[in-house]
Image: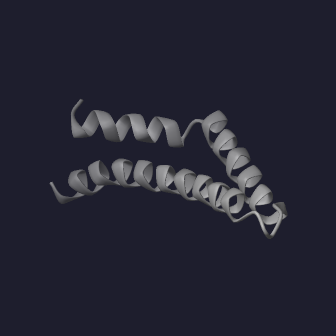
Amino acid sequence: MTQEEKAYAAGVLLDTPLVVKLLDQIEANAVDSCVLADPKDHEARAAYAAEVRAIRDLRSRLEMMRASTAKRNIAQ
């Protein structure tokens, strides 16, 4: 898969309302679970926080992939 194909695929995912909504819901549920977890249950809270970080990292990586081709096209 070329960089352009990856960038296009990343853009498609980020522009698909269902994908965005699912990621939003999963992230919100993980945040709520982290906040509402038993304060003494450090493992559960850490797991929910890790889930939030993973979702945010996925979005960030997709944005970087999409932006990489846009920057390359502007530079040319």
Q: Nearer the viewer, residue 5 or 55?
A: 55
* Quadrant of the rendered image containing residue 74: bottom left
Residue 30, position in %: x, y?
A: 72, 53
Q: Nearer the viewer, residue 54 or 22?
A: 54
Residue 65 vertical placement versus 1 (above, below): below
Q: Residue furthest bottom?
A: 39
Q: Residue furthest left?
A: 76
Residue at 69% across, 45% down: 26
Residue 51, position in %: x, y?
A: 60, 52
Q: Residue furthest front?
A: 40
Q: Nearer the viewer, residue 74 or 17?
A: 17
Residue 65, position in %: x, y?
A: 34, 49
Left or right of 25, for residue 20:
left
Residue at 78% across, 69% down: 40
* Quadrant of the rendered image containing residue 41: bottom right
Left or right of 16, for residue 3:
left
Question: Could you tell me how many numbered marks the image carries?
Answer: 0
Which quadrant holds the N terminus? top left
Left or right of 19, for residue 32:
right
Residue 34 vertical placement versus 63 (above, below): below
Q: Residue furthest top?
A: 1
